[in-house]
Image (cartoon, rainbow, N blue to C red):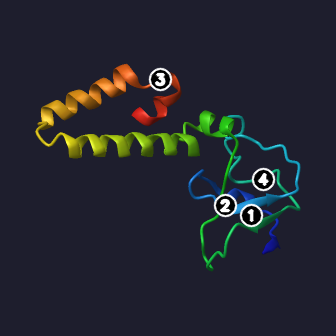
Amino acid sequence: VAQFLPGIYPLINYDSQLANVLEGGLTRTPTFRRVNPMAGANTDYHGFHLKARNHLPAGSELFLEASPEWYKDAGIPTSNMHKRADSVHRHLLKYDESHPELTEVQWVDILHRIKNEMLTTNDAGLAK
């Protein structure tokens, strides 16, 4: 389903996990909020269309995937960061199941050490 909606771009959110629409063929020059505080109130996007990845019920919120640079500048975790965090979480759950004797204090120590000693600079977003 493709549709033409001039001026809709300011209503679209960015989320790597929830992306449900794709952009259709427009070269654009976005105005960033840090340069122009009114960037969310107007748009440099005209004459473009969106294509739904799947069926979208009426009233659905629209989400696009953005470039990794956009996520980094905005301080928002990327899809890869979400996947990495899920992997770490799954490993911690398995470790917990195999070590039921650990106390809460020991778990806090383990998590503190993971955060401060094991996460790389690339994983910094996982520690927030």
Whether tag 2 and tag 1 are in contact, CB under 8 A, the answer is: yes
- Provide residue 50's location: percent of width, then percent of height: 78, 65
Residue 8: mark: 1
Which of the image's four quarters has the C terminus? Answer: top left
Which of the image's four quarters has the N terminus? Answer: bottom right
Q: Is residue 17 above or below residue 80?
A: below
Mark 1: few/some/many CA within 10 Å (<14, 14-19, 20+): some
The first of marks 3 and 1 along the sequence is: 1
Three-letter code for the amino acid on which mark 4 is drawn: Thr
Q: Nearer the viewer, mark 3 or mark 1?
A: 3
Can residue 125 be seen in this snapshot? yes
Question: Residue sitting at 67 percent across and 61 percent down?
Answer: 11
Q: Is residue 1 above or below residue 48?
A: below
Mark 4: few/some/many CA within 10 Å (<14, 14-19, 20+): some
Mark 3–mark 2 Cα distance, whole angstroms, equals 35 Å
Residue 11: mark: 2
Q: Nearer the viewer, mark 4 or mark 3?
A: 3
Residue wearing tag 4: 43
Residue wearing tag 3: 120
Mark 2–mark 4 Cα distance, whole angstroms, equals 10 Å
- Provide residue 15's location: percent of width, then percent of height: 59, 52
Three-letter code for the amino acid on which mark 2 is drawn: Leu
